[in-house]
Image (cartoon, rainbow, N blue to C red):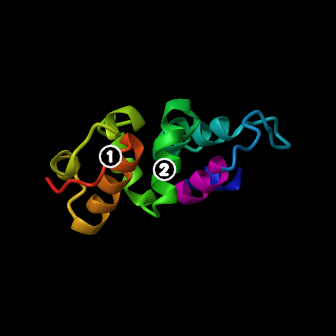
Amino acid sequence: MLACSNGAQNIIQILFKYNPDKEMLNQNEESAEDIIIKYSRRSSLVTLLQLQTPHSDALAKLLHELNLDKYYPVLRTQQIGLNEFSRMNEQDLKDAGITLLGPRRKMYLAICKLKGEEYKKD
């Protein structure tokens, strides 16, 4: 609750990664969402809503396993979920904002594994 009132997106992401009770209330009967709205923490509310969206969980989990969590917001702002991600090639990833070769290659290797394909250099 304190993370929500302070607008600490990183803490909110960590908390929601472990599926906490989203109905939990503080002593004032306020939920995390209520607190975020009360303190006008728009960026925290966006983070909270993204984390509560079930279809985003798979992509977030995959990127976390690859130690590429920081690219999740880049992909989500472009409405890229796991289905779209799994159809991307290296150029698509680059066009989506994954400009560094190492992370882009790591993602593309994961996409190849998802498809059950061998890595093919574009």
Tell me where residue 27 sits by quadrant. top right
Q: Amino acid at mark 2?
A: Leu
Magenta span contains residue 13? yes
Residue 57, percent from left and from top? 54, 40
Could you say whether the residue bearing mark 1 is in a helix, strand or loop? loop
Q: Spatial distance from mark 1 to mark 2, Cα to Cα?
A: 17 Å
Magenta span contains residue 73? no
In this orientation, which residue lies closer to the viewer: 109 or 45? Answer: 109
Residue 93, disc: none
* Residue positioned 33% across, 48% down in the render: 112
* Residue positioned 28% across, 68% down in the render: 102
Residue lying furthest bottom in this view?
Answer: 102
Residue 117, disc: 1
Counting residues from the start of the chain, the first of labels 1 and 2 encountered is 2
* Residue positioned 23% across, 49% down in the render: 93
Q: Amino acid at mark 1?
A: Glu
Label 2 packing within 10 angstroms: few (<14), some (14-19), many (20+): some
* Residue positioned 69% across, 50% down in the render: 18
Dominant SS of magenta comes to: helix
Residue 33, percent from left and from top? 63, 36
Residue 54, percent from left and from top? 56, 31
Residue lying furthest right in this view?
Answer: 27
Q: Nearer the viewer, mark 1 or mark 2?
A: 1
Range of residues picked out in magenta: 8-17
For disc 2, the marked residue is 62
Residue 58, percent from left and from top? 51, 40
